[in-house]
Image (cartoon, rainbow, N blue to C red):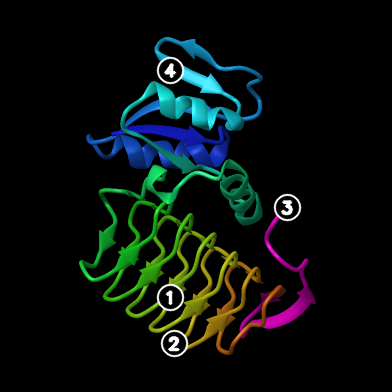
Amino acid sequence: MNIAIIGKGGHSKVIEDIIFSNIEYEIVAYLDDQYENVKVINGMYYGPIIAAQKMIGFFDDLLFVIAIGNNRVRKSIARNLGLSERYYATLIHRKAVVSSTAKIGRGTVVMASVVINADAKIGKHTIINTNAVVEHDNKVSDFVHISPSTTLTGAVTVEEGAHIGAGAVVVPNVQIGEWSVIGAGATVIHDIPANCTAVGVPARTVRKNAIGGVL
């Protein structure tokens, strides 16, 4: 399967590792707005993000992945491109452990050493980063970022666009509101409202964030 990576920054390097771990995939293009026009170098296509539609015409089996860590930017790109979800890959590192009953949406990436347990549901264009644990019956929505070594215990709900910082722990049955941010190392023991930042042990809301996720 041919893959075009949207975004050519630090996060794209981790996406590359997922692709290289799976012999079914081959990177054929990088799309980033640092490139003004489409060009081919040593058989690899490079071009601006808006060239995605053009890339589809070059390959019969092309899939895309948005390799950008910022949730708001990732949503904005997906919205502006307007591609059908069938054009997005779901990438899972071969060293991740994913239950057969878990469900993972299109455009989502699952990094090395991640564990996703029974009946977890993960939405579209979400990042489950290195060594994170998503326990049974979690519901993680679209455009979320679960940072490295985060633990979501059982039946946690994470709404659209939320960012859970590295090493954070969320106890069972807690809900994280849309577009909220949980600080690194926090322990979340109660629901966090939408559009808030919460830090500490136990986590407490320290400020309100901008509302909504579209740039």
* Amino acid type, label 3: Leu
- Residue 74 image position (x, y, % from top left): 59, 49
Q: Amino acid at mark 4?
A: Met
For label 3, count other residues whose C-alpha is less than 10 Å away and answer few (under 14), some (14-19) or many (20+): few
Residue under label 3, please give it. 215
Q: Nearer the viewer, residue 125 or 53?
A: 53
Q: Is residue 148 above or below residue 179?
A: above
Is 104 situated left or right of 29 in this image? Answer: left
Residue 210 belongs to the span the image colors magenta: yes
Sequence-wise, the earlier of marks 1 and 2 is: 1
**Label 1 – label 2 distance at C-alpha:** 12 Å
Report how far apart the C-alphas of labels 4 and 3 lie in the structure.
Answer: 30 Å
Q: Nearer the viewer, mark 2 or mark 4?
A: 4
Determine whether 68 is above or below 146 in the image: above
Q: CA distance from mark 2 to mark 3?
A: 32 Å
Q: Earlier in the sequence, mark 4 or mark 1?
A: 4
**How many numbered badges does the structure rendering display?**
4
Q: Earlier in the sequence, mark 3 or mark 1?
A: 1
Q: Identify residue type, mark 2.
A: Pro
Residue identified by numbered label 1 = 139
Q: Few, some or many C-alpha atoms within 10 Å of disc 2 (few <14, some 14-19, many ≥20)? A: some
Name the quadrant of the N terminus.
Answer: top left
Q: Which residues are magenta?
A: 198-215
Mark 1 belongs to which amino acid? Lys
Residue 37, position as x, y percentages in the image: 62, 17
Q: Do the residues under discs 1 and 2 have CB atoms within 8 angstroms?
A: no
Q: Where does label 4 land, which residue?
A: 44
Q: Nearer the viewer, mark 1 or mark 2?
A: 1
Residue drawn 35% across and 60% down?
Answer: 114
The CA distance from mark 3 to mark 1 is 25 Å
Mark drawn on residue 172: 2
